[in-house]
Amino acid sequence: MKITEIIITYLFAVIYLVFALNFFFNFLPMPELEGNALVYMDLLSSTGYMTAVKVLELLVAIMLLFNIKRPLAWLLILPVSTNILMYDVFIVGVPTLGLLMMGMNLFMVFRLRKHYLCLIG
């Protein structure tokens, strides 16, 4: 199971790292948004919220890649993974990358649950 955890950790970190860096440097072509997705992203971008989220994604990716407080990193990114899944389900209508990210995030939180016992006790 340790190999699975390592693969999930690095895959998850690389995905968040690439998309966070893409936000700042725009090296990947992004599909044109329309309808509710366009309105949602325009609102988030105009408030600076997306910048804060992308900085958090970048920070967590670095924490995961360099093994810096990994249990904390998995908890910090959980709301972001949840938001991506909700965006995919309720705005886009197709749970694609959000489902994958949420699944990996929940799996790792479950695997590291002993680190979080002090939060609930």
Image (spheres, rainbow, N blue to C red):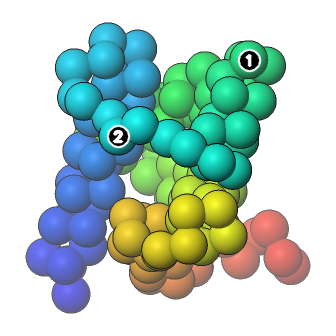
Characterize the local packing of mark 1: few (<14), some (14-19) or many (20 or more) Cα atoms within 10 angstroms. Answer: few
The answer to which of marks 2 and 1 sits earlier in the sequence is: 2
Q: Residue at x 41, y 37 (%)?
A: 32
Q: Residue at x 24, y 44 (%)?
A: 14
Q: Residue furthest bottom?
A: 1
Q: Residues within 10 Å of mark 2 (few under 14, many from 20)?
A: few
Q: Residue at x 41, y 14 (%)?
A: 24
> Type of residue at label 2?
Pro
Res 49 → quadrant: top right
In this view, the residue in front, 71 or 18, is 18
Q: Quadrant of residue 52?
A: top right
Quadrant location of residue 101?
A: bottom left
**Which residue is under mark 1?**
46
Amino acid on which the number 1 mark rests in the picture: Ser
The number of numbered discs placed on residues in the rendered structure image is 2
**Left or right: 101 as drawn, with respect to 120:** left
The residue sitting at 22% across, 20% down in the picture is: 27
Inter-mark Cα distance, 2 to 1: 19 Å
Residue 105 seen in this snapshot:
no
> Foreground residue, 80 or 68?
80
In this view, which residue lies farthest toward the right? Answer: 121
Where, quadrant-wise, is the N terminus in this rendering? bottom left
Residue 5 in the image: state x and y as whole percent.
26, 73
Q: Which residue is mark 2?
A: 31
Residue 85 percent location from the top left of the image: 57, 67
Name the element at disc 2. Answer: loop
